Each structure stands twice: as C-alpha cells, then as structure tokens.
Amino acid sequence: MELNIVCIPGDGIGPEIVAEAKKVLNKVASKYGHVMNFKDILMGGASIDVHGVPLTDEAIAQAKAADAVLMGSIGGDTNTSPWYKLPPQNRPEAGLLKIRKALNLFANLRPAYLYEELAAACPLKEEISKAGFDMLIMRELTGGLYFGERKTVEENGVRKAIDTLTYDENEIRRIAIKGFEIARKRRHKVTSVDKANVLDSSRLWRAVVNEVAKDYPDVELEHMLVDNCAMQLVKDPAQFDVILTENMFGDILSDEASMVTGSIGMLSSASLNDTKFGLYEPSHGSAPDIAGKDIANPIATVLSAAMMLRYTFDLDKEADAIENAVKQVLKDGYRTGDIMSEGCVKVGCRQMGDLLAERI
Ligand code: NAD
C-alpha cells in the first residue's frame, strides 16, 4: 500500500519526536511491504518564523491532499517566546484551530491505557489499577457549548453571561457512527455519556445514539450520566471500552482519563472527519523546557502513528506491531526520563526510537 503522510514537526520537542515516529513507520513499511511518502509542512512558531503566520493556505492545501497528517506539537514558552507577543490570531495555537477547521475534524479520540510496567505512575489505589484499563474517549469537537452563541449583558445593574449548548441530530449521528465503527475495531462496547436527566441536548443525543445503535447489533451500548462517569473513571476504569460524548463533557473526561494513566509522554490522540482522513498527534504539548536535549519521550507520537495506521489506513496488523513494540520496550526495562523508575535503563529520545524500530 502507498501511504501519503504529511508531517508537522512543529516546535519544541516536536521535530525530535516526529523523527522517531518516522523511524518506526519506515521500519513498518520495510517489514510489511508498504511505501510511505512523507512530506513536512510548517505550522505554529516554525511557520511564524518563516512566513509570519502560523499556517499558510499552501500548507493547508498540502495537508488536504494527503491521506493523513502526523503532528508533533506546536507552541513555545508562553511567558518568554516572542510568538506570544503577536495578536491571538497570529500565535502558534491559531494554526491548530485553523487546520482543525479546514479539515473538518469533528471527532477527537484519546486512548487511555495502563501499561503494567508503568502501573506505579497510576494515581489510583492498587486494588483498582491492578485490573488495568484500556479505553478510548471519543469527544465531539466542533459543536456544543464551546461553539454556541454567547454574550454578556447587564440587566438592571446586574451582569449576566449566557452560553448556548446546541446540537443538531446530524452532528450527533456522525460522531455516533464513528464511535460504533471504532468500537468494532476494539471490544465492541460503547458507553454514551450525557446529562439526559437535565438537558434537552442530551436527550436528543441519547435518542440519536439509540437510532445509530440499531445498525450495530454486535456492539453493546450503555448510557451513563456524566457525573456518574466521572466517578466510575476512578472507581472502575476497567469497565470502559469506547466512551462517546459531547464536546464539554469529553474535554473534562478525557483529561481525567489521561491523568489516571499517570504518564503524559505516553498519550496519543487522533482527530477525524467523516472520511478516513485524520490528524494524529500526542496529547502533550511542545515541552519547550526539554527541547533539543534528546530526552523527550517519543512514545505518544509513535502510538499516534499506530492510530493513524489503524484508523486511516485500516492496517491493524501493522498498528498492533507498533503497540506491541512499545509494550516490549517497557518490558525490557527501557525508559525515557519522564517514566523512569528504579532498576530500569534510562534512554534518550533517539535511542527509544531505535529500540522501538528494532522490535517491529
Ligand atoms: P507540555 O505538555 O508541553 O509540558 C508539560 C510538562 O510535561 C513539561 O514539564 C514537559 O517537559 C513534560 N512533557 C511533555 N511532553 C513530554 C514528553 N514527550 N516527554 C517528556 N516530558 C514531556 O505543556 P505546557 O508546558 O503547558 O505547554 C508547552 C507548549 O505546548 C505551549 O506553547 C502550549 O500552548 C503548547 N501545547 C501544544 C499542544 C498541541 O500542539 N496540540 C497541546 C498542548 C500544549
């Protein structure tokens, strides 16, 4: 298969971690007989330095023409970098918002997986964490409260702020379909999270999810209220497979789920549209404090590349090979500084990439 991948190395540790992900992908290509064509584009601070804007129209066109985008991270030190003296629409993060909009990326996926070898970093009690967990939060990314009409008014000398939470059935249906499709690639279970005891938007959410579920009789569906879900994530995270939810609930729950893994350098993510196209990136930022030192953990980016193989290219065997390589490297006792523990061998970013590629 020929894979056309646009890479956004970005800023900070971005170029270092993307280089390691490419190394691992190249090994996958040679082992499984694929051709991977990589093309780098500039975004964030790197683009500001060259073009004066965080993302050019030409870069967007190149991203659109690719099958998928693999990104490192963008942004600098928000206190000291000159990028943050620019007007908001010219700062690095504006590039990210622009590309998400241009590519219509409405579904955000964040897996939270507890590696046995890293269980000590999990903040949950051992009696809970020993069961392990392997879940994926699917969050609607372009609707709901964050995109509704908002205003602040003053009535009779009292200030009043109004935000609106709106969803139409088409927005709900397209993300529900993604959720069920992805559950089919996993353990065939969807937990749809809402606040249907209070909100109309949640009642519509629940009704549309039930309609979509009829086309997926092989996938188990349960509904859960968001307050209960927040509790269940720390009480019994092993129960979850795919958590399907709207924008604000997903924002909060995905951070909670990430935190229970305890390891920021291990968390991948994907943003998808209604084709097979996706933008894949680690959940962490550009870590300017450790940039250029060859100490960043490339695993979140490497795992994002595995998600790309699975969800854009349907190369499940190849994605499994990457995920198994990560497990094996941890089992063999190699760690970057952020996940280091006693008795393990500390390695840098490049060496971690080499070790992963060797295990493909
Ligand atoms: P951060 O995630 O970059 O860093 C938080 C801490 O985690 C730092 O101590 C960092 O050294 C460490 N860390 C992060 N990733 C690591 C890795 N792979 N290996 C080892 N250690 C790692 O968050 P921040 O410091 O709040 O943000 C820094 C910059 O990143 C800001 O400009 C922010 O806007 C940007 N950012 C970008 C994205 C994105 O591109 N999607 C996401 C979040 C933050």
Image: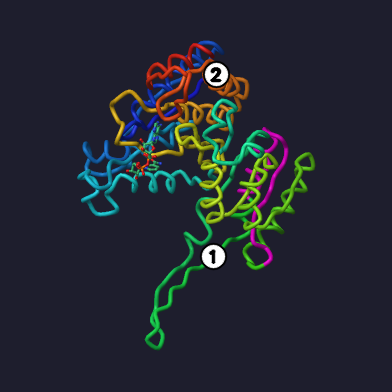
What's the mark number on residue 45? none
* Residue 191 lies in the magenta-colored region: yes
- Reading the image, the residue beneath label 2 is 325
**In front: 33, or 222?**
222
Could you tell me which secondary element the residue under label 2 belongs to?
helix
Query: Does residue 159 lie above or below 265 as drawn?
Result: below
Q: Amino acid at mark 2?
A: Ala
Q: Residue at x 71, y 53 (%)?
A: 223
Residue 130 placed where, x, y %? 65, 33
Q: Quadrant of ligand 1?
A: top left
Question: Looking at the image, which residue sits at the far right?
Answer: 217
User: Is residue 199 among what the camera can see?
Assistant: yes
| Numbered disc in front, either 1 or 2 | 2
Could you tell me which secondary element the residue under label 1 belongs to?
loop
What's the mark number on residue 165? 1
Q: Which residues are magenta?
A: 174-197
Query: Does residue 84 lie above or below 26 as drawn?
Result: below
| 238 sits left or right of 158 in the view | right
* Residue 208 lies in the magenta-colored region: no
Residue 226 placed where, x, y %? 63, 56
Rounded to the nearest angstrom, the CA distance separating label 1 from label 2 is: 43 Å
Which quarter of the figure is the C terminus placed in? top right
Q: Amino acid at mark 1?
A: Leu
Q: Residue at x 65, y 38 (%)?
A: 182
User: Is residue 25 among what the camera can see?
Assistant: no
Q: Residue at x 24, y 41 (%)?
A: 48
Q: Residue at x 54, y 29 (%)?
A: 118
Residue 165 placed where, x, y %? 54, 65
Which quadrant holds residue 177? top right
Which quarter of the figure is the N terminus placed in? top right
